[in-house]
Every structure is written in structure tokens, then in C-alpha cells.
Image: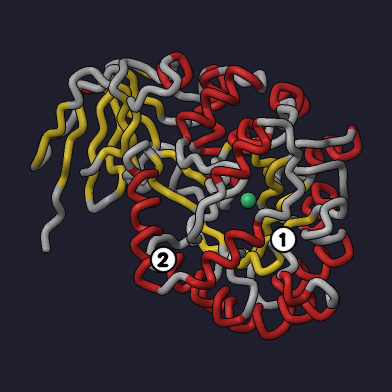
Amino acid sequence: MSSMSTLVTNIGELVTCDGTGEGGIGARAGRALVVVDGRVAWVGAAAAAPAADEVVDVEGRCVLPGFVDSHAHLVFAGDRSSEFAARMAGERYDGGGIGVTVAATRAADDEWLRSALAARVAEMRAQGTTTVEIKSGYGLDVPQETRALRLASEVTEETTFLGAHFVPAEMREDRTGYVDLVTGAMLAACAPHSRWIDVFCEPNSPHAFTGDESRAVLEAGRDAGLELRVHGNQIDHGPGVQLACELGAASVDHCTYLSEVDVDALVAAAGTTTATLLPGVEFSTRSPWPDARALLDAGVSVALATDCNPGTCYSSSMPFVIALAVREMGMTPSEAVVAATRGGARALRREDIGRIEVGARADLAVLDAPNHLHLSYRAGVPIARSLEI
Ligand SMILES: [Zn+2]
């Protein structure tokens, strides 16, 4: 089969996230790009563009890397909208509602879960997300966790075993037995379907895991060949961030409650560990906003993701996350776009996505707007979508 080339031209602003310019945004006017076999083959001045088999005229719109949503929980059934309403009325989140989703997910059949998952991934693509990481964590026994990862691996390469999401009701009196199961038979069954292992490290939640339990889970995962990510410091101060940095995790996610020692650890680990901020969760749980400005100024590697899940943030929208990061967390619009693309790629240890450069995957997004500022400027308006070539 011969290669098909596609020229994307008449781009109002091309955002490459190449590390140049304010926040590393790499935004330029008058550029075009050529895609061959799903990869970027050429980027340069539109006037010098080579001939191609097909031409896509984007009529002055902004083109940018597709969003990399490095944290999502998309394999689930059930509805927890009443919990959201209760939080808005003042109730505090403690992680307990996960059990509701576990019961509903266990009761759903494969076909129902597969089609719900496909609909959620399509909803993300329609908003400009071209890569999504998907975690298990609503099955919490061997067959159910394996099923979740098998389904997730049908739609993404970035699958994460999160058996240590919640201590299920039937194991509440035997936490040690549950950690043994997660690090033993469950890990053995799930590892073939997983790239990553994750843990909900939150000692002050009775439903989640202590520092020592989290360490045991992560070390077992690493021994099984999985790479590490951590849910840390969401509900309160705790050991999650420092544990992630010490073990060389690719990402520690949430970072809502950080001490100076945590920030120092993230600065020291910036070449290895990204702090992934999930402001949709702060929105949906009425929690304090992480100080992204302080993290960026200190030199921490920062990413943005949705944490799309039925409990604490049922939004699949990276543009919403970008707008929150700009409005509430002190990021500039450029920094927020970079954190949602190249930052997410870094949190997944990927160099072939989250940027537009020769050799990168042609995972592109387009805005019904002339430049990237509109992502936060026109908050709530559906201007972003993936560019299908
Ligand atoms: Zn999560």
C-alpha cells in the first residue's frame, strides 16, 4: 500500500508545544504541516509547503496537539449525582462513595460496559482528547479487575491496574488480606493487560491505603514489570507525594494538599515524576485549589488531566480543566495548554504525543477559534475537537 500524504493548511495559529515561547507553547502563525501514515512528516511555513495527496483547509482555525488525558476512570456503571448534590450542600468527600460504583459495575455485563466505555472515549475525542489513560478499580476482585483492564485495553494502550483503589466491603475486616490479594493473584491476572500500576494512597481515608500498604502495592507492581503512578495528597496531607518521588513513579496525581517538603521532593524529582493536577475534582468536591503557579515557579513538572469518574469529577472535558487551571490555579493559558498536552505525555512517559513535530503521531486537535487563548477565554463553549485525518 502506498503512503497517503495530507497537507493541513490555512492554520490561524499552529501550537506545537515545542518548548519555545511563553510557557513552552510554541505558537506561530503562517504554518502548515504534512501527515503521512499517521505521523507528522513536515512542519514549516505554509508558503513553502510540499505538495500532498490531500489538502485539509482549516479556514483560519487554531491547530494544536490532541489533549493527553493521563488520568481517567472510564470503566464503570451507576450514577452518583446525588453525592455531588450533597457535596454542594456542604458534605465532605472521604472516598466512601466508590463502593456504590463497585456494586453497580460488578452487576453490569461486558457488552454494557464496553459500549459505555466506547461512548465515553468518543465524548473525549469530540472535545479534543486523542490519548486517554484508563484505570481499573471498580471491580476489586480478580475476575472483575481483569475484565475492566481487558475492556480498557481494547480502547487505549495506557491501561492502569488500580486494584488498590478501595478496600471492598467484603474485605473491610481483613485489610492485610486485601493487600495480599492485590499484590498476589490480582496483580498476576491483571499485569498482562496493564502498562501501569496505581494506588489510592490516603491514610486519612478509611477506604484507601496507608503509606506502607501503598509501598507494598507499588513495589509488587514494579516487580511484575509495571510502571508506577500514585493517587496522592487528595483528601489530606499524607505520604503519597514523597513515596511517588522516592520510587520514581511517572506521576503523582491530585496534589491538593502539599507541604513544603512535598514540593521540595517534586522539584528534586522533576526529571522523573510529574505532578498531575485534576482541578475538575476540586470543582466537584469543593476542595481548595492546588497552587499550580507555585509549583511551576519552583520547577515542578506539571500536567493537567480530568480524573473523569462517576464520583468526584464526572467531566471528560480537558477544555474545562484548562479553564479552571487558568481561572483558579494561576496558570497562564499557554502553560495550561502545555500541561494538558505535552505535560500529560510526560506523565505517561510518551514522547510521540502531546507535541507537533516531525516523527510525532499526528494526533491533532482543532479549535473553532483563531488561537489557543480561546480555550479558557470561551470556557464552556464546545470549540475543541480532534482533527480526523
Ligand atoms: Zn483518580
What colouring style does the render use?
secondary structure
Pinpoint residue 28: horizontal percent, then vertical percent: 37, 18
Distance in Å between CA atoms under marks 1 and 2: 23 Å
In the image, which disc is placed on residue 199?
1
Front residue of this view, candidates 264 and 205: 205
Camera-near label (1 vs 2) is 2
Ligand 1 contact, mark 2 (Cβ < 8 Å): no
Pinpoint residue 239: horizontal percent, then vertical percent: 87, 51
Pinpoint residue 363: horizontal percent, then vertical percent: 34, 44
Task: Look at the numbered disc 2 and give the secondary structure of its residue.
Answer: helix
Q: Residue at x 53, y 31 (%)?
A: 321
Dot 1 and dot 2 residues touching (CB under 8 Å): no
Which mark is first along the chain, 2 or 1? 2
Kind of residue at disc 1: Val
Mark 1 crowd level (few <14, some 14–19, many ≥20, 10 Å Cα): many
The residue that disc 2 covers is 113
Quarter holding the C terminus?
Answer: top left
Look at the picture and state if 103 lies above or below 88. Answer: below
Quarter holding the N terminus?
Answer: bottom left
Q: Residue at x 63, y 83 (%)?
A: 188
